[in-house]
Amino acid sequence: MSESKKVIAAIATAQAAGGVGMIRVSGDDAMEICDKIFTAVSGNELKNSKGYRAHFGRVSDKDGDIDECVALVFRAPYSYTGENVVELSCHGGLYVLKRVLRAVLAAGACPAKAGEFTERAFLNGKMDLTQAEAVMDLIGAQGKQAADAALTALGGTLSREIEADTEKLVNVCAHLSAWVDYPDEEIEELENDEMLGTVSAVEKSLEKLLATYDGGKVLTQGVQTAIVGRPNVGKSTLMNMLVGSQRSIVTSYAGTTRDIVEESVTLGGISLHLSDTAGIRESDDPIEAIGVDMAKDRLQKSEFVIAVFDGSEELTKEDMDILEFCKDKLCLGVINKTDLDVKNVRDEISKYIETVVEISAEKLNGKDELEEAAAKLLETDRIDTTQAMLTGERQYLSVTEALSCVREAKFALESGMTLDAVNVSLDCAIEKLLELTGRKASEEVVNGIFARFCVGK
Ligand code: GDP
């Protein structure tokens, strides 16, 4: 039996107690295997069932009944994987689900590897690699925009765009090859301008796609964010407000936050991977000094900085150092403690940081303003989630490489190089695009993608 025809099984729902839990079984003999452990109240066997049918019954193993169960039957190719599939929905207790899975495995199925159901869907032509990646993005989505973008990609928007570009290049290539390989045939020579027009159009299209990566990355991967500010301005309190729980230690003594506390929060649908640091002032305390060094390092690496100031006090020398540091960074200024008597610090802060919001972290005031300002700065308010978008490093690299080959081809055409040279560059571009959709991806690439999935998907 070939590897892809083996019946695989896994718990497809979250590994936690829940109302319903589901075990997915996929492969040629999925129905026959499930018939060994499932008895429908109707007395009908799953192997005789039509597709898209639900059967109510019981699952049991050698020790007796395990649970009541609804068995959903899908017949190839009309299933998620494109194979015969049975989904056994039981009560969502972990004990029950694990025991049912053990029974399915004892009946002849193999445990599914991470992402193996989706990998089979890909291998069976149900989706391409960009859609498979979208499945993962959708599962991991932290907010509406990320979910919308993933759904657009799952619907094939990115694939269609890539395929349209590929086809244009393939047409030029095919014509060129025919013309170069069969000089005696009456093959009409493509006009240079016509080829240049097509290649330039593809160049533009790939450039446009590449430009979507920054936004796509922010939506799917989040943003490395540092909260910076001198001790006691309210960084930990702000972080707690964003996290929604008491995670950092909050005291009124300066310099309490010695370690870098990390937390991911969703602000306006964007994941911010926050680090709340010890501040960046010089310190004689050796432990604090280590914290300060770590903080500086973290700051250098962060993509987004939230600089916090105490609105109830005048700006200090350390505040000014922080402002100086923030000048060249993508930075959101936060004036905290606005529930107290507020000094006029805004004008000075605004000289260094363009976007400044006023909040009271302790009173939980200003979260909406923070969200809005962050979305503007990170430009997520301008992302059109209905359009094709690159969301992962792999996609970005493939398009970058394809674009570079397209530019080579364009240069070859413009500078009157041989058509062979044009052909070689176009071939390389096509290869990269086929790799992106998976129509010609190596096993390593495919395995690498699916290994990042969870088991059961
Ligand atoms: P950090 O050193 O910057 O992390 O500052 P903390 O978050 O530990 O806060 C220092 C002190 O300021 C604590 O006593 C907080 O309760 C207080 N604090 C923080 N935010 C506010 C605020 O919005 N208003 C007022 N009145 N006090 C605050």
Image: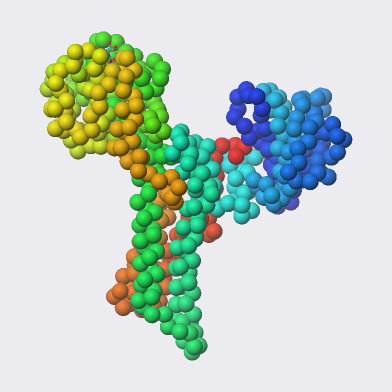
Q: Quadrant of residue 251?
A: top left
Disc count in the image? Answer: 0
The reply to whether residue 153 is visible in this rendering is yes
Check the picture and name the quadrant holding the C terminus. Answer: top right
Q: Tell me which residue sits at (35%, 51%) in the image.
A: 211
Q: Tell me which residue sits at (41%, 33%) in the image.
A: 269
Residue 1 coordinates in the image, percent (x, y): 74, 51
The reply to whether residue 261 is visible in this rendering is no
Closer-to-camera residue (27/314): 314
Q: Quadrant of ligand 1?
A: top left
Closer-to-camera residue (16/301): 16
Residue 156 coordinates in the image, percent (x, y): 52, 52
Look at the picture and state if 388 lies above or below 259: below
Residue 291 coordinates in the image, percent (x, y): 27, 22
Q: How is the image coloured?
A: rainbow
Q: Quadrant of residue 354?
A: top left
Q: Return the residue found at the far right.
A: 43
Q: Tell me which residue sits at (33%, 77%) in the image.
A: 417
Direction from residue 197 to residue 79 in the image, left or right: right
Direction from residue 362 to residue 8 in the image, left or right: right
Look at the picture and state if 194 lies above or below 209: below
Residue 345 coordinates in the image, percent (x, y): 15, 23
Direction from residue 205 to residue 185 in the image, left or right: right
